Amino acid sequence: MNRPVDPRDFASKLEGMADGEVLLNLRNVSLAFGGVKAITDISFDIRKGEIRAIIGPNGAGKTSMLNVINGFYTPQKGTIVFRGRERVGMKPHHAVGQGIARTFQNVALFKGMSTLDNIMTGRSVMMKRGLGWQMLWHGPALAEEIEHRKAVEEIIDFLEIQHIRRTPVGKLPYGLQKRVELGRALAMEPSLLLLDEPMAGMNLEEKEDMSRFILEVNRQRGTTIALIEHDMGVVMDLSDRVVVLDYGRKIADGTPEEVKSNQDVIDAYLGVAH
Ligand SMILES: Nc1ncnc2c1ncn2[C@@H]1O[C@H](COP(=O)(O)OP(=O)(O)OP(=O)(O)O)[C@@H](O)[C@H]1O
């Protein structure tokens, strides 16, 4: 049985960790699918409080890397240390319990459900009282439900989506669906938020809105963020540090300025032959 997750656990696990300390450390990680080497001997870290971008051309291994971080894939080689503890055989449903939440390249919401209910599903993973309790509508379950509703309403306010709270998400424009998906991830109160192409398919205005929300999540809520993004303008504006992958290998790691002027990165994006 999955252990219920108390959001306060996350805060206590992060207590004593200062901004800038290593939150997640990947060492010599390799992942292959049969003969396809998706990730080869990659090491990098994510520090508490930063926005860390993972970039690279198509097929570079970015999504695979995100899937390794949240336990969806277990690498054949390498070590992963999260909050000072080496992780062994973590599964995706443990990720939430550890304080890792993610969004997906293609929005993964319940299309027939409202914005409110979709965000509430993010919260449900933290509920201590099971369905039986809720059906009986006992006092403690009711109190917990009210507490979660309050947290969800705060997220709805924060993301400025009050006007669509009752709308089925399948009826929303794509940009707003992405925002709701961000809301659902925030409902899990993650210490590490993974965003897979948060701006994909968005127009300029939607991108500007999403950039603002990502920055506010990071600055106001103190959430550490790792994101994959193809829009270089966005990456350079938002990120504190950028790791660049190409053909499953790390080719650069540094500030946006350092990475932008790195010759290997320029070659990779121009498609220079290896
Ligand atoms: N489940 C899988 N089974 C087999 N091969 C896979 C699988 N997932 C990824 N790959 C392969 O691993 C390599 C890296 O893929 P990945 O999706 O991680 O790259 P990416 O950088 O995220 O690409 P994109 O920018 O196109 O999304 C590719 O060669 C891909 O075909």
Image: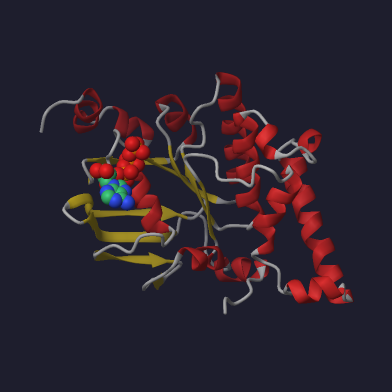
- Where residue 265 appears, as percent x and y from the top left, is 24, 31
Question: Where is the C terminus found, in terms of image quarters?
Answer: top left
- Identify the residue at the far top of this view: 204
Q: Is residue 64 above or below residue 6?
A: above
- Identify the residue at the far front of this view: 112
Q: Can you see residue 31?
A: yes
- Where residue 58 appears, as percent x and y from the top left, is 30, 34
- Where residue 162 appears, as percent x and y from the top left, is 80, 37
Quarter of the image where one finds residue 211: top right
Pick the residue in front: 266 or 59: 59
Q: How many marks?
A: 0
Q: Is residue 223 above or below residue 179?
A: below
Say how the picture is coloured.
secondary structure
Q: Is residue 71 above or below residue 138?
A: above
On the rendered structure, is 160 left or right of 256? right
Question: Where is the N terminus found, in terms of image quarters?
Answer: bottom right
- Identify the residue at the far left of this view: 274
Residue at 87%, 76% in the rendered image = 138
Pick the residue in front: 131 or 63: 131
Q: Can you see residue 243?
A: no
On the rendered structure, is 272 left or right of 219? left
Residue at 74%, 36% in the rendered image = 161
Residue at 39%, 54% in the rendered image = 67
Pick the residue in front: 253 or 214: 214
- Where residue 271 appears, as percent x and y from the top left, is 19, 26
The image quadrant in which ligand 1 is located: top left
Q: Is residue 140 above or below residue 59?
A: below
- Identify the residue at the far bottom of this view: 1
